[in-house]
Amino acid sequence: MKIEVNSPTISQLPTDRSPKAVSSSNVSEAHGGTEDRTTFQSDSASVQALTSQAMNSPEVRQDKVDALRQSVNSGEYQIDPTKIAGAIVDSNSI
């Protein structure tokens, strides 16, 4: 996971502690008057906790790197040059 150096830190994020609710209703006459309702509720404490957890996660997952290195060294990991070239082209077109 790459974390941008210039991204806002927790101290720069808004600190509104009140829970926020967002709801949307849609009455569809085409479906016999049924009503669809969606509700999303979030509070800044849970967002702040998730942000803190993400910021404290290591940038390199060493166990994954070691497992991949071992499979490459043992010959179990086969590299497809066509897929690599395609991924390079795709990443440059963004």
Image: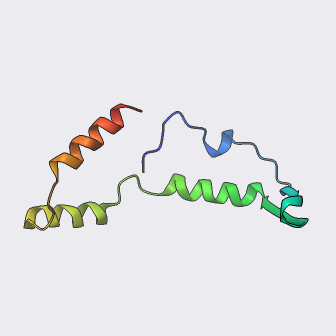
Query: Would residue 66 be found to the left or right of residue 13 on screen?
Result: left
Task: State the colouring used for the structure image.
Answer: rainbow
Q: Residue at x 27, y 38 (%)?
A: 88
Q: Residue at x 74, y 58 (%)?
A: 45
Q: Residue at x 23, y 67 (%)?
A: 67
Q: Quadrant of residue 69?
A: bottom left
Residue 16 placed where, x, y %? 81, 48
Residue 42 placed where, x, y %? 77, 59
Query: Would residue 57 be found to the left or right of residue 49 on screen?
Result: left
Q: Residue at x 29, y 43 (%)?
A: 87
Q: Is residue 92 above or below residue 82?
A: above
Q: Is residue 50 above or below residue 6?
A: below
User: Between 11 and 94, which is closer to the camera in this rendering?
Assistant: 94
Residue 59 placed where, x, y %? 40, 52
Query: Would residue 94 be found to the left or right of residue 18 on screen?
Result: left
Q: Quadrant of residue 33?
A: bottom right
Residue 68 placed where, x, y %? 22, 63
Q: Is residue 86 above or below residue 46?
A: above
The quarter of the picture where the C terminus appears is: top left
User: Between 74 and 60, which is closer to the camera in this rendering?
Assistant: 74
User: Between 88 and 51, which is closer to the camera in this rendering?
Assistant: 88
Q: How many marks?
A: 0
Query: Would residue 74 be found to the left or right of residue 86 on screen?
Result: left
